[in-house]
């Protein structure tokens, strides 16, 4: 068995195989492992934004209900082991090493899995070994050919659909929706979050073709926020009032509603929860890197939003902060990947920022500060350039007073680097 550092190095090496969409390799690997994913029920969550938060909420409620819960998400921020958890605990290093060897044996000489395929098989086997009662599985990218689609879930969910990963998923919302709808299985209930008409039409058609009962936010279930009394969920059968969510941002109400709708449908299929578990799970859930407050005076907020749809949630948060604290200045630290819609993202963040610092995550995919500056148009001349994230954070602290807000955003990879700096630890290279 390899050491943990050697296992991580091996996994890192698989990234050279890039992204290969398709299910043949993962299905063969899982068959050779004895189909570990058939030993426990699963919930499958896809969508452009919010799927990680929704998965975390569903897992938190199920854990509060007394279930032993596996959670598989991607990417990680600092530590590879963040991707694979049981009851909130990261997979131990020795289990990563042991399972890397086992999955290697399953690949043999005939398969060449990608990093994500290998990691998915590793996670599904780990959950079987730990005898989880249920696993909550987040889609990696798309859905139709994503490795996680090898599972047969109790319930599926598509949180929303927007343009992202266009080189793989298509250049129209309809095309992206078609790929996301690939997780819909015949006869399996599917929850749909807030969708534009084009996406709703595609997902509705595919659900109908596959005879998958469709439950839509705003139709079969609803959510309403009250700033004084908490939020209300009116579901298929359940109603909950006065709920609170530990994750900040009004957009999290939609994610919470999707999680609760999934849990309602899963309960009808043999996975129970309670009113108390709903309240406890939502009020204590944690999900790093999503409007996460890591310091105060000045307020330091980290958010991995990386496309215009996600930037809308960040912009709403910043606008709310400005209304509540009119004398507080906002310092934005922005770094993005080269293949993202930089202009569309920055167009939403810039009007709310008093100072803008451009930086770049230390990866070849990152847009340079010069490329980001060019995306700013006329405002480019006023931006500060700090290629190293550590320098960007130091500059932000110098520019901000104790009553101001610093927002680091534009990329989960950037957020991961900043979190590693704050913790004083070495960053795991595997974050894609």
Image (tube, rainbow, N blue to C red):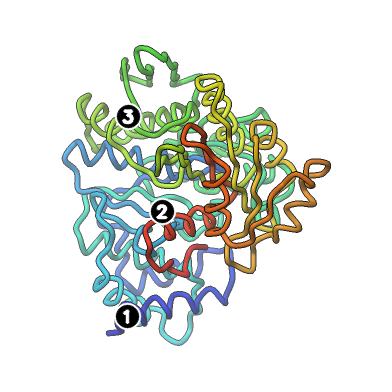
User: Looking at the picture, does residue 239 appear above or below residue 27?
Assistant: above
Circle 2 SS class: loop
Residue nearest the observer in this picture, 132 or 88: 88
Q: Residues within 10 Å of mark 1 (few under 14, many from 20)?
A: some
Looking at marks 3 and 1 on the same chain, the residue that comes earlier in the sequence is marked by 1
CA distance for labels 2 and 1: 21 Å
**Tag 2 residue:** 73
Looking at marks 2 and 3 on the same chain, the residue that comes earlier in the sequence is marked by 2
Residue nearest the observer in this picture, 379 or 349: 379
Image quarter (top left, top right, bottom left or bottom right) of the N terminus: bottom left
Q: Residues within 10 Å of mark 3 (few under 14, many from 20)?
A: some
Q: Which mark is residue 101?
A: 1
Q: Are marks 2 and 1 in contact (CB under 8 Å)?
A: no
User: Looking at the picture, does residue 197 appear above or below residue 59?
Assistant: above
Residue 272's spot in the image, x, y percent? 22, 34
Circle 3 SS class: helix
Residue 301's spot in the image, x, y percent? 47, 41
Residue at the image point whose x is 29% and y is 76% from the top: 97
CA distance for labels 3 and 1: 38 Å
State left or right for residue 156 relative to residue 71. Answer: right
**Tag 3 residue:** 264
Residue at the image point whose x is 41% and y is 63% from the top: 120
Residue at the image point whose x is 56% and y is 33% from the top: 313
Residue 23's spot in the image, x, y percent? 51, 63
CA distance for labels 2 and 3: 22 Å
State left or right for residue 400 relative to residue 131. Answer: right
Say which of marks 3 and 1 sits in front.
1
Whether residue 394 is visible to the viewer of this picture, yes or no, is yes
């Amino acid at each position: 068995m390899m050491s943990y550092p050697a296992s991580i190095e091996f996994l890192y090496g698989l990234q050279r195989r890039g992204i290969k969409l398709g299910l043949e390799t993962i299905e063969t690997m899982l068959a050779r492992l004895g189909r570990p994913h058939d030993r426990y029920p699963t919930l499958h969550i896809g969508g452009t934004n919010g799927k990680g938060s929704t998965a975390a909420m569903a897992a938190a409620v199920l854990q509060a209900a007394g279930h032993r819960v596996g959670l598989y998400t991607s990417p990680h921020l600092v530590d590879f082991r963040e991707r694979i958890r049981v009851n909130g605990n990261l997979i131990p290093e020795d289990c990563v090493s042991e399972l890397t060897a086992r999955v290697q044996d399953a690949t043999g000489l005939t398969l060449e899995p990608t990093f994500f395929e290998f990691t998915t098989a590793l996670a599904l086997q780990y959950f079987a070994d730990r005898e989880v009662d249920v696993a909550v599985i987040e889609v990696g990218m798309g859905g139709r050919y994503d490795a996680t689609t090898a599972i047969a879930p109790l319930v599926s969910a598509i949180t929303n659909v927007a343009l992202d990963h266009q080189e793989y998923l298509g250049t129209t919302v309809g095309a992206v929706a078609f790929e996301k709808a690939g997780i819909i299985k015949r006869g399996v209930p599917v929850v749909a979050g807030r969708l534009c008409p084009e996406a709703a039409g595609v997902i509705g058609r595919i659900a109908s073709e596959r005879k998958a009962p469709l439950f839509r936010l705003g139709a079969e279930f609803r959510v309403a926020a009250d700033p004084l009394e908490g939020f209300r969920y009116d579901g298929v059968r359940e109603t909950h009032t006065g709920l609170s969510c530990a994750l900040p941002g009004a957009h999290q109400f939609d994610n919470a509603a999707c999680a609760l709708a999934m849990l309602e449908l899963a309960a009808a299929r043999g996975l129970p929860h309670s009113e108390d578990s709903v309240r406890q799970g939502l009020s204590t859930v944690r999900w790093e890197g999503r409007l996460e407050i890591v310091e105060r005076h000045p307020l330091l907020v980290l958010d991995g939003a990386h496309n215009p749809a996600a930037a809308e949630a960040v912009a709403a948060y910043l606008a709310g902060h400005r209304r509540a604290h009119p004398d507080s200045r906002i310092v934005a630290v922005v770094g993005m990947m080269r293949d993202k819609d930089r202009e569309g993202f920055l167009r939403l963040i810039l009007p709310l920022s008093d100072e803008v610092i451009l930086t770049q995550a230390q990866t070849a995919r990152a847009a340079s500060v010069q490329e980001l500056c060019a995306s700013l148009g006329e405002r480019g001349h006023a931006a500060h350039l700090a290629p190293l994230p550590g320098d960007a954070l130091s500059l932000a602290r110098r520019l901000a007073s104790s009553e101001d807000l610093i927002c680091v955003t534009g990329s989960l990879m950037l957020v991961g680097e900043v979190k590693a700096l704050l913790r004083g630890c070495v960053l795991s290279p595997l974050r894609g």
